[in-house]
Amino acid sequence: MKKFYLPVIVFLLLTFTSCVDVEERYDFKVDGSCNVVYGFDMSRAVSVLMNLMTDSIKATPDFAAKKDTTLNFYSAMPDSIQQTMDSSEVKLAKTSDLSVKMDLKKNLMRVSVNHVAKNTADLEYYLKNISKISMNSQLAAITKNTGQTKTNDAQQLITGQDYYTYEITPSRFSRIIDKIKFNAFLKRTQSTLVMAKAMLIDMPYKLVLNFAKPVKRVNNPKAVLSADRKRVTLETDMDEVIRNPAVMNLQIDF
């Protein structure tokens, strides 16, 4: 299982320099639990990349591979990394799954990270720590010796988005972008963002939050509230976020 993880992530990191569609989804349950999914659809990036590849590269076994699998986040980590984690990080990783769907010949490449939070405190801890755990342990360890010069910038785009401050209670979901951390993120990933813009490829982002009861108030004018007031949807892209980071700020009372 662990051997499969390496080529998938390496390819993910390389293709991310072109384009990725990001969808962040939260499903809040009546009992206070929440299922949160980070989805990365790199199918358009694969399509662009395939046009740049030679026939000899396309003929390699990696490009003929088809995968549709789900791995436990913790079990996919090398043993050496598992041993460095504290009990809270282990618990977080063990309650998260990584799903991969890949068929390069059909320009299909989707990766998602799924976590079930048992309550609001669990969810807040997950959101505050999943980027750090992914960046400092799993992806960093896996790409450490690949020899790919582009992996660092792309890796940070995938797992380095730790620039939010969260407040989550049984009646409120709030996040505010930390401009200092966001500017540092932009500095770290500047070369990747410039490359994507030069290729005239956008980086769309979609946030969907489903609630068990009607929403009372949403403070972001770009957020769309469904007719039954139980779903909030926010759509933007990286260009808009760079121009106006506050577009990502959100406070929902329900």
Image (spheres, rainbow, N blue to C red):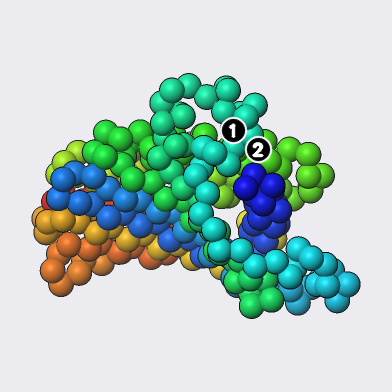
Neighbourhood count class around disc 2 (C-alpha, 10 Å): few under 14, some 14–19, many 20 upward = some
Q: Where is residue 218 drawn, in percent x and y?
A: 20, 56
Tag of residue 140: 2
Image height of 26 relative to 141, above or below: below
Residue underneath mark 1 = 136
Q: Is 131 situated left or right of 234 in this image?
A: right
Badges 2 and 1: C-beta atoms under 8 Å apart? Answer: yes
Q: Which residue sits furthest front?
A: 1
Q: Quick one: SS at disc 2?
A: helix
| Position in image of residue 108 (x %, y %) | 60, 71
Residue 240 seen anywhere in this rendered image of the structure: no
The x and y percentages for residue 164 are 40, 41
The quarter of the displayed image where residue 234 is located = bottom left
**Residue at image x 86%, y 76%?**
55
Between 213 and 90, which is closer to the camera in this rendering? Answer: 90
Residue 149: image tag: none
Name the spot of residue 193 as percent of width and height, x first. Answer: 63, 56
